[in-house]
C-alpha cells in the first residue's frame, strides 16, 4: 500500500486482495445483548517476508514473535495461531490474493474479466467451507484499496455479482474506501485519475459495508509522534464521521497498535507511530485508546464489526500476534536509533490479545 506505507511483495500484482476466511467467533461487548465480531488481518507470506526486514529483528536486543520466524504453510503454526487468536476473541481475516502498490487502478475490459474470473474461482474454492465467514448467510469478501479504482469498476462489480449468483452465492462485499485521499469515481477510460478528499458515494454504494485497512499516511506529518500528542486520532475521528455521514452504507472501523516500517524500507524515511499513547503511558495504550475513541464509537449497530490491522504484518510492525517477553528498548543495530526513531519497543507478550479480550469481550 503505497499511501499506507506498504510495499507489493509478490508478483504479478492483483487489485483485490483480502478475502475473509477461516473461522468465526462472536464476542460479548457493551451492555446486555450487544456483541462484536472482531477480525484481524492475517498474512500468509512467511517465512519469506521475515527476510524483507522487520523492526523486531533490528532491535537491541532482538525481539521475535513467540512462534519464532515461522512458516505460514505449516499446519501446526496455523493451528497455534488460530488457537491464540480465538482464545482472545479474534477472528482472522486471511489475505488470499496479492496486494497492489499503485496510486490508482484502472478497470478496463481485461481487468474486469480477470476480476470476475478470479472471484468465481475463489467462490468455488472457499465459499462453501463451513468455517467461512458469513453475514446473514452471505459469504463475506473484503476488497482492498477499492478507494484507488476507477473506470469500469461498477460494471465489474455488477458482473461479479451476477457470476456469483449463478454459482449460488450472494456475497457480502466490504470495500476499503475510508482514507484521506481517494480516487474519484469515474467510468470514463480516457480520463486521468483524480484524487479527492471526499467520499465517493457512487462507489461506496457498490458495497454492503466499507472499512479502512490502515489510516497511516507518510504524507501527513501532523500524525508524527505519540498519538496522544499528535493529530492522528483526532483526524481519524473526523474522517470516520465524514464517511458515516456521507451514505447509509455500514462502516466497519479499523484500529492498529502502531506503525513502523523503517526496518523494511528505511530509504523512504517514513515516520513511525509508536505503540504508546504518550511517552510515559504503558505498552498497548495507543491500541486501547483507538478501540475506545475510534472503534467503539463508529461501530454500526447493524453489523457490530471491528477490524484490527493486523494479526501478523511484521514488516510494518502493526502486528498484535504475541512476542517473546522482553524489556523496552529504543536501541537498534544502527547504533543511532535509525529504526526506532528513539521510541521504546517492548517484547509485549500477550498484551494486545489481552487488550482485545478486556475491551471487546465484556
Image: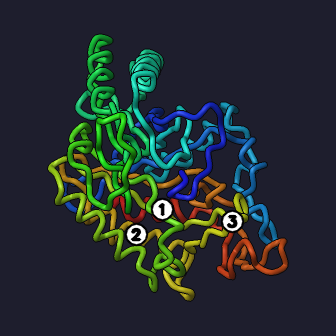
Q: Tell me the element at label 2.
A: helix
Which of marks 3 and 2 precedes in the sequence? 3
Whether residue 309 sits left or right of residue 187 in the image: it is right
The image position of residue 8, as x and y in percent, is 62, 44
Q: Tell me the element at label 3.
A: loop
* Badge 3 density bin: few <14, some 14–19, many ≥20, Cα 10 Å: many
Residue 324 visible, this orientation: no
Whole-angstrom CA distance, mark 2 to mark 1, is 8 Å
Q: In this rendered view, identify the residue nearer to me: 197 or 123.
A: 197
Task: Please identify the quadrant where the C terminus is shown.
Answer: bottom left
Q: Is residue 321 above or below residue 202?
A: below
Q: How many marks?
A: 3
Q: Is residue 352 above or below residue 188?
A: below
Q: In this rendered view, identify the residue nearer to me: 361 or 153.
A: 153
Q: Which residue is mark 2?
A: 290
Q: Which residue is mark 3?
A: 262
Q: Closer to the observer: label 2 or label 3?
A: 3
Whether residue 103 sits left or right of residue 243 in the image: it is right
Which residue is painted at 26% across and 38% down in the image? 207
Which of marks 1 and 3 precedes in the sequence? 1
Q: On the image, which quarter does residue 346 sit in?
A: bottom right
The image position of residue 246, as x and y in percent, is 18, 56
Q: Closer to the observer: label 3 or label 1?
A: 3
Which residue is painted at 43% across and 45% down in the image? 145
Q: Which residue is mark 1?
A: 256
Whole-angstrom CA distance, mark 2 to mark 3, is 23 Å
Q: In this rendered view, identify the residue nearer to me: 10 or 324.
A: 10
* Badge 1 density bin: few <14, some 14–19, many ≥20, Cα 10 Å: many
Give the residue at the far bottom of this rendering.
280
Label 2 close to label 1 by CB (< 8 Å): yes
Whether residue 38 sits left or right of residue 72 in the image: it is left
Q: Tell me the element at label 1.
A: loop
Amino acid at each position: 500500500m503505497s499511501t499506507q506505507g506498504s510495499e507489493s511483495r509478490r508478483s504479478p500484482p492483483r487489485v483485490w486482495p483480502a478475502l475473509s476466511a477461516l473461522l468465526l467467533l462472536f464476542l460479548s461487548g457493551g451492555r446486555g445483548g450487544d456483541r462484536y465480531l472482531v477480525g484481524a488481518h492475517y498474512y500468509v507470506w512467511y517465512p519469506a517476508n521475515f527476510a524483507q526486514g522487520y523492526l523486531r529483528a533490528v532491535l537491541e536486543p532482538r525481539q521475535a514473535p513467540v512462534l519464532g520466524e515461522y512458516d505460514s504453510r505449516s499446519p501446526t503454526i496455523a493451528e497455534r495461531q488460530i488457537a491464540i487468536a480465538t482464545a482472545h476473541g479474534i477472528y482472522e481475516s486471511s489475505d488470499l490474493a496479492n496486494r497492489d502498490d499503485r496510486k490508482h487502478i484502472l478497470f478496463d475490459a481485461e481487468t474486469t474479466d480477470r476480476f470476475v474470473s478470479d472471484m468465481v474461482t475463489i467462490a468455488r474454492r472457499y465459499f462453501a467451507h463451513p468455517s467461512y465467514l458469513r453475514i446473514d448467510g452471505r459469504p463475506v469478501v473484503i476488497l482492498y484499496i477499492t478507494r484507488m479504482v476507477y473506470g469500469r469498476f461498477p460494471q465489474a462489480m455488477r458482473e461479479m455479482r451476477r457470476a456469483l449468483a449463478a454459482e449460488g452465492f450472494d456475497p457480502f462485499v466490504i470495500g476499503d474506501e475510508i482514507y484521506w485521499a481517494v480516487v474519484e469515481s469515474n467510468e470514463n477510460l480516457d480520463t486521468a485519475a483524480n484524487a479527492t478528499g471526499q467520499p465517493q458515494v457512487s462507489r461506496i454504494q457498490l458495497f454492503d459495508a466499507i472499512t479502512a485497512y490502515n489510516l497511516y499516511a507518510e504524507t501527513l506529518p501532523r500524525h508524527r509522534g505519540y498519538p496522544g500528542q499528535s493529530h492522528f486520532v483526532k483526524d481519524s475521528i473526523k474522517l470516520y464521521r465524514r464517511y458515516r455521514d456521507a451514505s447509509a452504507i455500514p462502516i466497519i472501523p479499523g484500529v492498529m497498535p502502531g506503525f513502523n516500517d523503517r526496518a523494511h524500507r528505511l530509504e523512504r524515511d517514513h515516520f513511525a507511530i509508536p505503540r504508546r499513547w504518550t511517552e510515559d503511558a504503558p505498552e498497548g495504550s495507543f491500541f486501547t485508546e483507538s478501540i475506545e475513541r475510534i472503534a467503539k464509537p463508529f461501530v454500526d449497530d447493524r453489523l457490530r464489526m471491528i477490524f484490527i490491522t493486523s494479526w501478523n504484518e511484521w514488516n510494518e510492525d502493526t502486528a498484535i500476534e504475541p512476542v517473546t517477553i522482553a524489556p523496552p528498548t529504543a536501541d537498534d543495530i544502527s547504533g543511532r536509533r535509525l529504526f526506532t526513531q528513539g521510541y521504546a519497543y517492548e517484547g509485549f507478550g500477550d498484551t494486545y490479545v489481552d487488550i482485545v479480550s478486556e475491551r471487546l469481550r465484556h
